[in-house]
Image (spheres, rainbow, N blue to C red):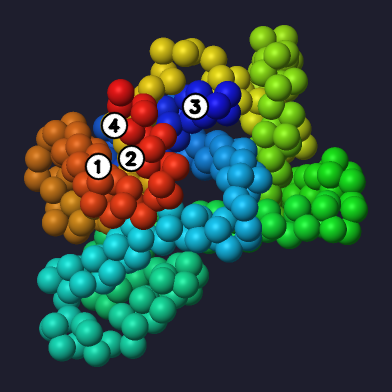
């Protein structure tokens, strides 16, 4: 196992995924007893952490792929199987709780629009199913999936980026700086105009992904000096995130915090030895919370018990998804690496 693979990315992604899940649990349940915990959870920061790790790992995946086709197939196999399962399963199973009859449900144009939009990663075009979750705070079946289209876009941009560097001979760092500055400018502009929903989309998130790529390309230097860099990065992050509320250097400072955590604390290196359940936690938690809300379980039973049950069921679904849906589609090398972790 090479120097890149000995890390805590599995642990970090697990923490980020559960952060997002618990933040959505607080928002969708609307339980007063949970609201005090909201200040300790930052779902957006967790998502940014995912983007940083993606930049690092996707650059590695692309450089380790012999041809473009191999890279695309690898990325498609990692994302699409479980994603298709959650979309199709939700569309079929939630027909049971719809206020529409079975015939009305499956013949309704909204059902087919939902399938078309979500299977093409355009969840925002139709987030709801006919007659489903109409009494909930939001009717969206799976509001967490908006980031998947960003991930897919990142995957497609990486070959373009490397083509510009290798074929068109653009300077790697000059290109990164341009992309980074355009990204943070886009984000801060739309945030200043009150359009956070636009600010958080692809251009605004690209700075975090680009940071991950730079960290991969400078892995040895950063790993060597990480103990000296971490304190300045913590100071810059606290200043920007909590005081100035800007994002000029936050992708870099937070990115290094993620990098530092990934390559320190060796006792966490084998956290993912039994599997990478992160993706499953991320894509399955939202519809499960919505279902519990629709059934009125948050008000019928003690909140702590219901919240614990949701998180346990989410983890169970993620485990089943990993072994039954995700793992069989991974590359041979990835399966072998997973096997080595368990030995």
The residue beneath circle 2 is 277
Spatial CA distance of label 3 from label 1 is 24 Å
Secondary structure, mark 3, is loop
Q: Nearer the viewer, mark 3 or mark 1?
A: 3
Which of the labelled discs sits on residue 214, or is there none? none
Secondary structure, mark 2, is loop
Q: Position of residue 184 (x, y in %)?
A: 75, 46
Q: Quadrant of residue 64?
A: top right
- Compared with residue 110, is residue 256 higher up or lower down, i.e. above or below? above
Q: Quadrant of residue 80?
A: bottom left
Spatial CA distance of label 2 from label 1 is 6 Å
Secondary structure, mark 4, is loop
The residue beneath circle 1 is 319
- Can residue 186 be seen here? no
Is residue 214 rendered to the left or right of residue 282?
right
The residue beneath circle 4 is 274
Residue drawn at x 13%, y 83% as measured from the top left:
101
Residue drawn at x 18%, y 52% as measured from the top left:
292
Q: Nearer the viewer, mark 2 or mark 3?
A: 3
Is residue 125 rendered to the left or right of residue 280?
right
Q: Earlier in the sequence, mark 2 or mark 1?
A: 2
Which of the labelled discs sits on residue 1, or is there none? 3
Q: Nearer the viewer, mark 1 or mark 4?
A: 4
Secondary structure, mark 1, is helix
- Cβ atoms under marks 3 and 4 closer than 8 Å: no
Q: Nearer the viewer, mark 2 or mark 4?
A: 4
């Amino acid at each position: 196992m090479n120097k890149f693979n000995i890390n805590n990315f599995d642990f970090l992604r697990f923490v980020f995924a559960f952060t997002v899940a618990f933040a959505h649990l607080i928002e969708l349940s609307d339980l007063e007893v949970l609201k005090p915990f909201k200040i300790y959870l930052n779902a957006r920061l967790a998502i940014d952490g995912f983007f940083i790790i993606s930049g690092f790992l996707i650059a590695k995946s692309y450089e380790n792929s012999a041809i473009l086709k191999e890279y695309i197939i690898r990325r498609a196999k990692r994302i699409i199987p479980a994603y298709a399962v959650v979309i199709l399963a939700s569309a079929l199973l939630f027909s049971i709780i719809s206020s529409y009859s079975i015939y009305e449900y499956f013949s309704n144009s909204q059902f087919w629009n939902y399938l078309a939009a979500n299977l093409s990663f355009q969840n925002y075009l139709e987030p709801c199913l006919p007659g489903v979750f109409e009494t909930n705070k939001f009717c969206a079946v799976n509001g967490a999936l908006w980031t998947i289209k960003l991930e897919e876009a990142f995957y497609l941009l990486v070959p373009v980026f490397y083509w510009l560097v290798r074929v068109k001979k653009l300077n790697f760092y000059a290109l990164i700086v341009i992309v980074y500055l355009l990204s943070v400018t886009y984000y801060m502009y739309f945030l200043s105009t009150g359009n956070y929903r636009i600010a958080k989309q692809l251009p605004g998130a690209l700075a975090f992904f680009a940071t991950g790529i730079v960290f991969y390309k400078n892995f040895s230097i950063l790993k060597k000096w990480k103990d000296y860099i971490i304190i300045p990065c913590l100071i810059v992050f606290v200043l920007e995130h909590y005081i100035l509320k800007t994002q000029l250097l936050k992708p870099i400072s937070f990115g290094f915090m993620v990098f530092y955590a990934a390559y320190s604390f060796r006792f966490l290196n084998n956290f993912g030895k039994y599997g990478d359940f992160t993706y499953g936690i991320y894509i399955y938690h939202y519809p499960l919370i919505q279902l519990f809300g629709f059934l009125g379980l948050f008000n019928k039973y003690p909140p702590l018990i219901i919240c614990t049950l949701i998180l346990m069921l989410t983890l169970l679904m993620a485990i089943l998804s990993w072994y039954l849906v995700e793992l069989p589609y991974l590359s041979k090398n990835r399966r072998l690496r997973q096997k080595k972790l368990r030995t």
